[in-house]
């Protein structure tokens, strides 16, 4: 019998892994795919990363600097669940990309290096999750190495993140003697992840024999203390973002990964409701709705394709169906939506709420776009962050100004950079969160458009989106400040300031003007 929409939706788990670089995100992703049956051999994810990098010109930057810029999605089925892992760029210069990706997940796995605890990027990414009430499962990685005391790590999570912790498992041994975990809640024990099920036991005492004699007593005392002193897991508190279940393991040595997959299946929520301008959309609503959170160009340079990654928010997407693009009101044929697996892509005949599909297109789709089966609604909340760096693009061949304009427009639609056109007609200004984005822009303009460019300082360094309750107030400000006003990709006005001081000064002088650093994509632009 065909699966109902409600059944299909309830099986889905869409999540991201957040971590400070080097904590083990790639290794953990790979092991999730390995134990989830999506890949045969460890090493494929990294190998694939390398292959993709050598195939693509602009990704040279990644290869040279050893960073990962590409966000992608990977799907696998385990037990009865369909898991969609959304990968996020590790480097903070691509933070806006990561933040946008986090709008498309229902849960996150926070990976912490057991020796290092909470690191700066972990904290930042956690804050974004908290802003969006994304429930978090914690994986304390690298227990096979010298690590901090588990209680100390739990305390740090509680203090630095103001998040209650509930250890579900407790590590057996440390560094060289680490040999698995005792499941506090289930009273079972699992050695490595080659054991599919945990073995029922009779309390920590009955597990201690796995350790060298001199460590047994400490293990028993510590685990009993954990059972007594730590909070029991409360799923409601977890779903509301107040509590995190904690697992200990070693992604590299295959410990704790199965616990994590099971936790994602058992605890993590199915696809969440999504807020649109006209109503709240439920995942089990009949009609398909989706939004684009990421555009990826050049995944396959032979095809020069541009893939829009869309998160389905409700209903069922079927290949061949027509969707309405809210921004323009036009119809779009979904003739070749794609799923991504560890080592290949595949045509998606049907996809359900929670799934992420790649939609090949030639520039029709932009970040933040909403697709529906006809209904006029726009999803809120795919953010645009005000850039940290503003630059003018200097073209070596002035004859190519028109081509540059087109190219910059394209890059801005893909979310590579933000583009601001000054009202006074002076050359466009590009804005980025991190300097590496400028390098990507430069390389791509050269490789794809044959446009050699350099960047010049702009007299501006800060920008804010502006609005006013009374349209007349905004008009007046736009006229008076014309030399400091630009329009973004959507035609929305931004105020450009020389520095933070002049920004504060102007905003105090013009209290009727609201200046914001984060803009939700075309929130008010339903056609
Ligand atoms: P990232 O994506 O978060 O940046 O981290 P990644 O998985 O690339 O892991 C960073 C380094 O930590 C890698 O070592 C990886 O092998 C190691 N690692 C990951 N998980 C564990 C673990 O559970 N235990 C131990 N001991 N090491 C772990 P590398 O030497 O930098 O890279 P590689 O040459 O091994 O690929």
Image (spheres, rainbow, N blue to C red):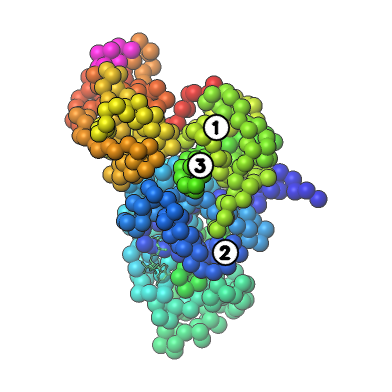
- From the image, give the main secondary structure of the stretch colored magenta: helix
In the rendered image of this protein, does residue 291 appear above or below residue 350? Answer: above
Q: Residue at x 24, y 37 (%)?
A: 455
Q: Secondary structure at mark 3?
A: loop
* Residue at the limit of the structure toward the bottom, as seen here: 213
Mark 3 sits on what residue? 305
Q: Nearer the viewer, mark 1 or mark 2?
A: 2
Q: Nearer the viewer, residue 19 or 343?
A: 343
Quote the CA–CA distance across marks 3 and 1: 20 Å
Answer whether labels 2 and 3 touch (C-beta < 8 Å): no
Q: Is residue 440 left or right of residue 313?
A: left
In the rendered image of this protein, does residue 134 appear above or below residue 174? Answer: above
Mark 1 sits on what residue? 370
Marks 2 and 3, the one that precedes in the sequence: 2
Evaluate whether residue 169 shows in this view: no
Q: Secondary structure at mark 2?
A: loop
Quote the CA–CA distance across marks 1 and 2: 33 Å
Part of the protein shown in magenta: 475-482
Q: Is mark 2 within 8 Å of ligand 1?
A: no
């Amino acid at each position: 019998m065909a699966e109902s929409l409600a059944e299909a939706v309830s099986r889905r788990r869409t999540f991201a892994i957040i971590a400070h670089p080097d904590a083990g995100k790639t290794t953990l992703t790979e092991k999730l795919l390995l134990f989830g049956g999506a890949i045969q051999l460890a090493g494929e994810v990294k190998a694939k990363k390398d292959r993709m990098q050598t195939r693509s010109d602009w990704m040279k930057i990644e290869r040279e600097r050893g960073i990962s810029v590409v966000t992608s999605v990977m799907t696998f089925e385990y037990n009865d669940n369909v898991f969609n892992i959304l990968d996020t760029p590790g480097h903070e210069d691509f933070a806006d990309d990561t933040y946008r990706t986090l709008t498309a997940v229902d849960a996150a796995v926070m990976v912490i290096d057991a020796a290092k605890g909470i690191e700066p990027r972990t904290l930042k990414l956690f804050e974004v999750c908290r802003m969006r009430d994304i429930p978090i499962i914690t994986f304390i990685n690298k227990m096979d190495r010298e690590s901090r005391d588990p209680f100390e790590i739990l305390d740090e999570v509680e203090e630095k993140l103001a998040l209650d912790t509930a250890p579900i498992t407790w590590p057996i041994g440390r560094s060289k003697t680490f040999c698995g975990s005792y499941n506090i809640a289930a009273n079972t024990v699992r050695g490595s992840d080659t054991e599919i099920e945990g073995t029922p036991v009779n309390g920590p005492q009955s597990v201690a024999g796995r350790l060298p004699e001199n460590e047994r007593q400490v293990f028993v005392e510590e685990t009993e203390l954990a059972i007594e002193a730590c909070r029991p897991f409360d799923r409601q508190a977890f779903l509301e973002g107040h509590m995190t279940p904690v697992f200990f393991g070693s992604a590299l040595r295959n410990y704790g990964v199965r616990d994590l997959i099971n936790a994602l299946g058992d605890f993590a929520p199915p696809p969440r409701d999504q807020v649109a301008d006209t109503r709240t959309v439920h995942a089990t609503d009949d009609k398909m709705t989706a939004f684009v959170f990421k555009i990826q160009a050049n995944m396959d340079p032979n095809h020069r394709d541009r893939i829009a990654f869309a998160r389905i928010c409700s209903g069922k997407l079927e290949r061949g169906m027509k969707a309405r693009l809210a921004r323009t009101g036009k119809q779009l044929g979904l003739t070749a939506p794609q799923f991504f697996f560890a080592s290949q892509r595949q045509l998606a005949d049907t996809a359900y709420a929670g799934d992420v599909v790649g939609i090949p297109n030639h520039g029709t789709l932009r970040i933040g776009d909403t697709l529906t089966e006809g209904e006029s609604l726009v999803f809120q909340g795919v953010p645009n962050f005000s850039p940290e760096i503003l630059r003018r693009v200097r073209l070596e061949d002035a004859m190519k100004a028109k081509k540059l304009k087109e190219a910059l427009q394209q890059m801005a639609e893909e979310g590579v950079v933000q583009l601001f056109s000054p009202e006074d007609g002076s050359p466009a200004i590009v804005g980025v969160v991190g300097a590496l984005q400028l390098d990507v822009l430069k390389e791509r303009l050269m490789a794809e458009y044959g446009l050699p460019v350099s960047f010049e300082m702009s007299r501006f360094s800060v920008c804010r989106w502006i609005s006013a309750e009374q349209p007349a107030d905004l008009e007046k400000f736009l006229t008076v400040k014309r030399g400091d006003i630009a329009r973004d990709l959507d035609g929305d006005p931004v105020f450009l300031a020389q520095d933070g001081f002049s920004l504060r000064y102007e905003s105090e002088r013009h209290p009727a003007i609201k200046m914001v650093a984060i803009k939700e994509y075309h929130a008010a632009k339903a056609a």
